[in-house]
Image: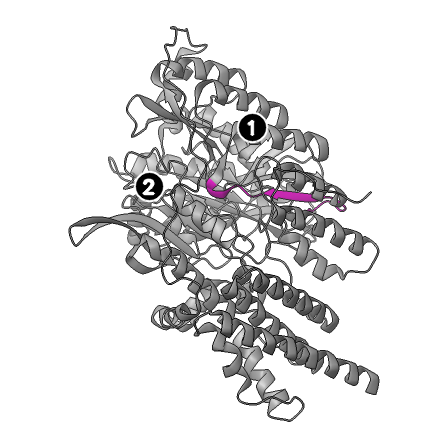
Amino acid sequence: MDLKVENRLVSQAAQDDIIELETKINAYRSLQFDEDKFRSFRLTRGVYGQRQEGVQMIRIKLPYGRVSPEQLIRISDISDKYASSTLHLTTRQDIQIHYVKLENSPKVWEELEQVGITLREACGNTVRNITASAYAGVDAHEPFDVTPYAHALFEYFLRNPICQDMGRKFKMAFSSSDTDTAYTFIHDLGFIPREKEIEGKRVRGFKVVIGGGLGAQPFMAQTAYEFLEEDYIIPFTSAVIRVFDHYGERTKRHKARLKYLLAGIGLEEFMRLVELEKKGLPEQKLAIDHANIISTNIPEKKTWDAVKVTNEKKYDAWFKTNVIAQKHEGYYAVNVKQLLGNQTSTTARAFAHVVKKYASDDIRITVNQGWLLKFVQKEALPHLFNDLDALGLADPGFDSTADITACPGTDTCNLGISSSTGISVALEKMLKEEFSDIIYNTDIKIKISGCMNACGQHTIANIGFHGMSIKKGDRVLPAMQVLLGGGVEADGSGSIADKIVKLPTKRCLPAVKELLNDYEANGLEGEYYNVYYRRQVAADKMYFYKMLKPFSDLDTLTDLDFIDWGQDVQYVTEVGVGECAGVMLDLVSTLLYDTEEKLRWAMKLYDKGAYADALYASYVTIVGGAKAMLTMEGINCNTQMGILNDFDKHYIQTGKFAFKGVFAEEVVEVNNTEPSKDFATRYMNKAIAFIEQIKAHRISTVSSN
């Protein structure tokens, strides 16, 4: 039976999305829809293929990590009904559920939309979930709460035509203060709040950084503005995305991120292109609607009876490491450590009820895969601790060395090479047992990824690992690349870690012991780990390599070294095709189908009076049509501008296609012309005529062959 979305709580746009997803699934199952095209489609709807055949991971998009107790209960219920009854918190403040049948994904989406949650653009070549400091709104050091700004960008770019089919994904983050707890320096765009006096008034704005990224080749973001007034951040972001869309790489997937475009043309030229785009934007200035956000329900202060905590020693450590005073007098924020970011649905429901009892309804997922609760009275803290402890959620040491960040790795991801979760569990256990005071150290962060793609953020760790394999004769063993010296510095700036040595994964625990013992023995009083690291490297650049090299000796391997963490059978390398950013499509029929869909979308936007959006949808329609024609001739193009220039060269100038004027110049007129109704009408008619001409050319070409 076809899914019918008839719920007053679900917007019409979401209803259309859900029904379209089911329609496409049915078409795919009946072999009426190309597999590559379907993969690209479902990814932008949060449906991601797992390592295990026949099941999907569903990524639940939670802007700036906010989730209410009611929403958490709904996600838990859905996980029980359709998935594996485990919720996974990600470093991008999403929640993922696993082992979902493809046919159930529209039902999952519809039930999430009933409580105000979307899957739209959670994966794929789109603007991904916009992250923010979990402390936003309660941070004693913040100039102002960045939550409304993150929410405004989320809403503005959701379903926006300029970011539906980019060459690669696009990530943004808002930090609450200069301490940069959201890691803006690794994002395509990052925003750090500032206030400035202009003509006698305190004006809000942001330091804006651009072009950061992790992956196999990490880049630090560059400063685009030291101060950009708040009403210009959305137009600026729109222009940046359009430049990325036009000039970004589209064929070589590993070079298709904004960081490579920026590195290739330089910041000055990039900003020049951004300025050129601004004239074609629907708004040159756009005020942030601070009221358009779900308000936090702050619990009324009440009298709490004295209560004896279940474990005095544990409570004292928990209070010191997991509890912080808010900027609101009398209230505290409480961090909840979540091992590997994994929580069973049963625990999640109980946790949600605990939150309702003691805190506000504004739960935030943290970038290190934990939780933050807000507005807890001091007198309620012992009560909260007892209830959390009963659920196994009162472990002290939040965001400490003993709080390891790790991606799912080989558990569910196609790209996982060696286990990131198994080693994390073993490493946390070892740290607690042998370095009991490490829970008070927030200077050293350990982060682990199952492959080089850095979902576990290993490249910004003080001590990082990423999964790999090593050959020994005719056998293969699981291994880890060790990295040191990354992360957020004392001044809030960021650093990328250095690669040191590759180790068999079972040797990594003694290697960490050696690193920590050396730091304790040779670090100066009060010296940050990265300062100690650089001091040692300055004296001897091979210092850490020499320290860890003995652990890489393959002549002393035992049979246990050939078994990965958490496994009991011999290791075998099994790496599939990753879906982190969708796929590149070159089939002519698929491209033409996609082009016609975009044209229909442009017409709908025009009918709604959204002329700027209709113009951009018409623009990508023309680009898509030109790419389809070039593909017929076996001509591959890396960028949108390359497509337009090559179409001019191979079709217009050769007389294969009738067109007055320079094709590329006519098409890009959309980027520097005010988006009026008259211009939108003329430009859309041009797009319609162009597609009709392409279809006629295609028919004549096929029939002649």
Asked if residue 262 lies left or right of residue 449, the reply is: left
Q: Find residue 102 and name its label.
A: none
Q: Is residue 240 above or below residue 554?
A: below
Residue tagged 1: 70
Residue 347 is one of the magenta-drawn residues: no
User: Which numbered disc, 1 or 2, marks the residue closer to the eye?
Assistant: 1
Residue 10 position, x and y percent, is 62, 41
> Front-most of 661 and 624?
661
In this picture, which residue range is highlighted in magenta? Answer: 49-64
Asked if residue 347 lies left or right of residue 286, the reply is: right
Asked if residue 200 lies left or right of residue 109, the reply is: left
How much space separates mark 1 and mark 2, taking CA atoms? 41 Å
User: For residue 586, what is the image quadrant?
Assistant: bottom right
- Asked whether residue 102 is in view, the answer is yes
> Where, quadrant-wise, is the C terminus in this rendering?
bottom right
Q: Badge 2, how many Cα within 10 Å: few under 14, some, many 20+?
A: many
User: For residue 521, what is the image quadrant?
Assistant: top left
Q: Considering the numbered disc 2 on the image, is that residue within a helix, a strand or a loop?
A: helix
Residue 227 position, x and y percent, is 27, 56
Query: Which residue: 44% across, 61% down?
Result: 238
User: For residue 519, what is the image quadrant?
Assistant: top left
Residue 52 is one of the magenta-drawn residues: yes
> Where, quadrant-wise, is the N terminus in this rendering?
top right
Query: Which residue: 28% across, 24% down?
Result: 329
Q: Considering the numbered disc 1 on the image, is that residue within a helix, a strand or a loop?
A: helix
* Disc 1 residue type (three-letter): Glu
Q: Badge 1, how many Cα within 10 Å: few under 14, some, many 20+?
A: some
- Asked whether residue 416 is in view, the answer is no
* Disc 2 residue type (three-letter): Tyr
Residue tagged 2: 529
The residue furthest left is 200
Residue 688 position, x and y percent, is 64, 75
